[in-house]
Structure formats: C-alpha cells, structure tokens
Amino acid sequence: MKTTRKILSMLMALTMIVALAAIGGTAYADGAIKIGGTGPLTGGAAIYGNAVKNAAQIAVDEINAQGGLQFELRYEDDQHDAEKAVNAYNTLKDWGMQISLSSVTSKPAEATSVEAYTDRVFSITPSASSTATTEGKDNVYQMCFIDPAQGTMAAQTIAAKGFGSKIAVIWKNDDVYSSGIHETFVAEAAEQGLEIVSDTTFADGNNTDFSVQIADAQSKGADLVFLPMYYDAASLILTQADNVGYYPAWFGVDGMDGILSLEGFDTDLAEGVYLLTPFNAWATDERTAAFVAKYQELYNEVPNQFAADAYDCVYAFAQACEAAGVSADMSREEICEAMIAQFSTMSFDGLTGSGATWDVETGRVTKEPIVVIITDGIYVTVD
Amino acid sequence: MKLNNTKRKNLLTYAVVTVCYAVFQMLSLGGNLSSTLKGMLVPICAYVVMAISLNLTVGVLGELSLGHAGFMSVGAFMGVTAAISLQNVIVSAPLRLAIALIVGAVFAGIVGFLVGIPVLRLNGDYLAIVTLAFGEIIKSVFNNLYLGLDSRGFRLSLLEDRTNLHEDGRLIIAGPMGIGGIEKIASFTAGFVLILICLAVIFHLVNSRHGRAIMAIRDNRIAAESVGLPVTRYKMMAFVTSAAMAGAAGALFALNYSTVVANKFDFNTSILVLVFVVFGGLGNMLGSIIAAATLTILPEALRGFSNYRMLIYAIVLVLVMLASNNEQLRSMLSRIIPKRKEHTHDA
C-alpha cells in the first residue's frame, strides 16, 4: 500500500505541474476590444448559455464585418454554478477581457458581478434577471427584465386582457427565478382583483410528476394556470394535464421561451399558451427577420429571447463604444468609466424593444414587454 | 531523534502544506499568480479540509458517508449568518472570519451528533444510504428556510417568508435564493491555518488511544466489541469531529463568494469530496490534500479544450485510477524508490 501511495502522489504532482503550466497569463491582442462572458455551456441550463454565446458571436461578426470598431468574443463555461462562474470570470480576466457580458444565469451573475465591480469591468448581462445582480454596483447593467417585474407585469396583463379570473400557480420553491416571480405575481394579483385558488410547489428532486399540483388546480376550478418556471418542467405539466384532460389557459414567463424547440415534446400541447416575453422570433420587422434567418442558418434552430438579448447587448456595446470613442488600447478601467457615462444617458433600439433606457441607480432596463400566444407552432403577438 | 514512519509521514504532510502555502502566498503577493489560480486558493483550502475530514470518516473510521456536503452546507449557512450578524459589532475581518468558522464548525458538529445517533448504529451500505438521505434533507431545509435579523433579534420561518422584519432588519437566509451580498472575508492564510488545525486534530486523534480504538472498530467490529470497546461512542467521536471540520470548511468556502445557495451542496459535491478521498488513498491525509488541490485545479486548467473539457477531466480520472492500481507500474516504481526498512500498518 505504501508504494501505491507514493505512485499516486507522484502522478498527482505531475498532473498538478501540467495543470499549473496550462494556466496562462494575461495577453493583449491588437485592434479588437475583448468581450468576455460566462454561461452554462454544458449541463442542465446549457440551452441558455449556448443561445447567448451563439447570438453574441453573430453580433460580433456583423459588427466586425462593417469595419471600424472591432470586437473579440470569448465565452467560458460556468455550468450554472457561482463557484465555477468566478473561476471562468478569472480565466477571462487573465485573457485580458475589457468589457463583460457578465453571466447568463442569475446566481452565477451575482457572484461574477461582485468581481466585475471590484475589478472595474463594465458588465451588462443579457439574461441574469435577479435584482441582486446589479444592486449596489454602478458598472453592472441588465438587458432583461428583473424577475419581480415579470411577476407584476404578468398579473397586470392577465387582469387587463381578461385571460382568466380563477388562477392556479405552480412554482418551483427552490429556484430563485421561480420564487421571485411568484412573490410579486401573488402580490400584484391581489391588487388586480385576481383570485388565486391554488398555489402549489415543486422542487429539484420531485420535478417529474405533477399530478398532485394539476389535480389541485383542476379540482379548485382554476381557469388559468400561471407557470413561472423554465420550459422543461412546464413541458411535463402540459403533457400531464393533457393526460388527465385538463385544459385551462396557460400563462408562462420568459423561462417558457424555448418550449417549442424542446426535443421529444409534442408541440401541439403548447398551442394556446400565453407567454410574456421581450422577443418574438416570428415578428416580421426587418432586423428580427435577418437575425433569425442568420441564426437558423448557422445553428439550425429558432433563436430564443436570451439569444436576442445577447445580440442586443453586443450592439449596445457597439453603440456606446462608438459614441464614447472607446478603442482597444484603453484599459478596462477607462472603458468602464466611458461606458457608464454612455449607458446612463443613451437610448437603445434593439430586437427586444425600441427606446430601451437604463436606470443609473439600479442598472435596470426599461422597455415594453410583449405578450404572445402560441398558434400553429409559432408565436403570435397579442395586441 | 528517531522518528517512526507515521510521524515522518505526518511531518511531511505539514511540510508540504506549509511549503505550498509559502510559495503561493509569495507568488500572489508578488503579483505573479494568474487571476484564475488566485481565485481558486480559498476554495482549494476548503476542499482540502473537506477531503481530510471525510477521510477521517471513510479512511480511519471505515464508514462510507455520502452526505458530507450536508455538513459543509450547515457550516456555510450558519457561518455566514454569524459573519453577517456581527458585521457591525466586530470590525476586524479576520476575527469575524474566525468566529464564523467556529460557529460553522459547532453547528455542523451538533448536526453531526444528532444525525449520528440513529445513523451510527447502522453499518456499511445502510449507513451510506442514510447519510445520502441526510444530505438531501439538509439541502431541502435550507431551501425552505428564511432567517432574518432586526432589532428584535433573529426571526425564523419555514416554507415562506413570514419573518415580518422591521425596516432596519435584514433577511439573511432567503430560502431558495440562499444568502446574497456576503462580504468576502475569507483569505488564503485563514484557509492555510484551518488546514493545519484540522491536520493536527486528525493526527492527534489517530495516534491516540481513541484513534487506535476507532481503527480497531474499522478493522474488525466484532472483535473490538468483544474486548469491550464502546463502538457507537468511538464512531460518534470520529463522525462528529469530521462533521465539525466540514462545517468550518463550508463557512470558509461560503465567505469567499458573494452568494451561496443550498443547491451547491448537493449529492454531487458529496461525491466529489469522496472522489478526492479515494483518489488520494483511504487514510492517507497527504494524498487527500494533493488530490483535492489537483482535482479542483484540473477542470480549470483544461479550459483550453473547451467543449471536451469535462470529458478529458473524466478520462484523466479513469487513467490515474487505473495506473495507480497497475501491478507492473507499482513494482517498477518500487524498484526505483528503495523501500524503507521499518514497516507500519496502513493508516
């Protein structure tokens, strides 16, 4: 056994040396401003990370092709974990990142935005929607709506458009995103005079069988079920409700976006589902159509709203960099100050809404959400 | 001075840890360390403590525990809560950190004791399953726990936030959102000191009368019982020590990030720590330390392989395991390295 240990230690020492040698130092490339971002490129939330990465790359390529301002993009995997996100952020810092796309998901973004604040890296997250991401950090901005705002907007929309009056809510109680939306939805629903007849939860270990939650909603006569969750769980709920013959109106928020591209899911079941989303991939305006066509050509799928948010982030960078005269030889601190000055005053027109402005204090975005209904496998905007 | 092999090995362990600390601290102060590595120093220390504490349960006590991350979780949440509560009372960050680590260790120790009462009456696979369940329970509890602090003191509620804090209050643990806005007070030096303390505790325990009793229980429980050793008591001693150290590691880990969630300390983390222990050799503390450090750095070092990163990481694991169990390689290396005359038992 002694020898085993010795061999083991030697092997590991060797691995460690190789490992240390592989971790490189800072290097600056010439001409291009370096944009870095972390996101879940593997694991359960990979669909978001990859969508953001792909769309940001499209935007960077388009901007670079115009000549003038040049960007270089690098994405690192954080597996939707705060610890790994900080590691990924530090790797990007070693690479020489000058502007950051922060992190794709909320908790990792909370961790990396603190680092970005300390290091003075200007950051805008395409999709991390928790309030803590930007709170107290003057150089961290959001392109997406914050979670609580989605709950409020959902309740207002349901009441205003009369989608339903007896509401059931099924939410994930160990998920920041889901509980954040649930909280404000319940509060706003009371304001709007909506009656919540069923309020049931699920969590990580028991997210495959929803018969209890569905039966509760059905027995209490809910005519609309609000699903503040990601599309994977929502798809199971839709399938299982169909099995028991329960067909209320379904209302999802932006996490529901992506349900149509889920493999093995019968998209007929998603017919008639309402969604609150900033982006409709089937919209007919020229920019959206061009982006969607390009994305489909390269990655063979319809881009979701996270992709659109990321695309907008890069264009917002370009707009701010041009206005402030930012060049690649500037340090990240200089760029940070210039970008803060721009973002706090500019108005930006993107795929996810025109005239977007940012609040200087909180870094939050202000733009109009849209409500879509899934009809014949595509989104149709509800007026 | 004549040293036996165990003592020599222990001294070597202290020496390796100290030299590593000195080298990295100097590199770090001199600004020669990449941000990636610098950012990983504290988590490495935390994982090292996790590995050596689990090694006490698995290697020395001989019981398979699959819920070690549960104790880390208790330590993380309680330690951070202590650190946040004392933010305005104690100005000195190192002192606050020390208190947080102690609070984390004490709470994890208490939980370890409570869990140990039913669990340690079981053996082998049964114990593994129960500890696994325990890890899930802890995760579930912290996912549904709301703890706030205001002028009236701590306010606690389960399932939903009913703490009704005053304006001046602060919700510390916010259910699934975990703890946010943590002031990062963990330092590499604190991690180093924690490792040294844990090593000292383990080495002293293992080389004491109690330690020999614990190992006797591992080697043959029936024989140990027949000579009158109180099996459950000794098991409890090792288990609680192990849990307390994991709690301190959890507090150190959590205070290195601005945010912590219960889902971080899931089954995967327990298994990861178990991998460190098995990789480094059961009962071999130096092995655990090196394994924990290496396997924490490795996935980051492999970022150059982008999409194939985790695949290569897994392949490296398999290869090292195969190589370390290869008879031919072993005999080849034992020819290169002369054998020591003295022979000690495997601990």
Image (spheres, coloured by chain):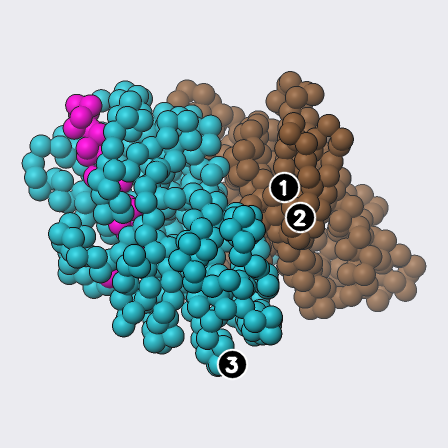
Asked whether the residues under the numbered discs 3 and 2 touch, taking CB atoms below 8 Å apart as contact, a structural biologist would say no
Same chain shared by disc 3 and disc 2: no
The numbered mark at residue A244 is: 3
Q: Main secondary structure of the magenta part?
A: helix
Colour used to depict chain A in the structure image: cyan
- Give the residue type that dot 2 points to: Leu
Asked whether the residues under the numbered discs 1 and 2 touch, taking CB atoms below 8 Å apart as contact, a structural biologist would say yes
Query: Is residue A316 part of the magenta span, yes or no?
Result: yes
**Quadrant location, the N terminus of chain A:** bottom right
Q: Which contiguous range is marked in magenta?
A: A302-327
Q: Name the element at disc 1.
A: strand
Callout 3: few (<14), some (14-19), or many (20+) C-alpha neighbours within 10 Å? Answer: few
Name, please, the residue furthest toward the top: B91
Q: Position of residue A325 (x, y in %)?
A: 17, 23
Tell me which label, 1 or 2, sits earlier in the chain: 2
Report whether residue A353 is seen.
yes
Task: State the residue in front, B88 or B215.
Answer: B88
Callout 1: few (<14), some (14-19), or many (20+) C-alpha neighbours within 10 Å? Answer: many
Give the residue number, with chain letter if any, for mark 2.
Answer: B145
Same chain shared by disc 3 and disc 1: no
Give the residue number, with chain letter if any, for mark 1.
Answer: B173
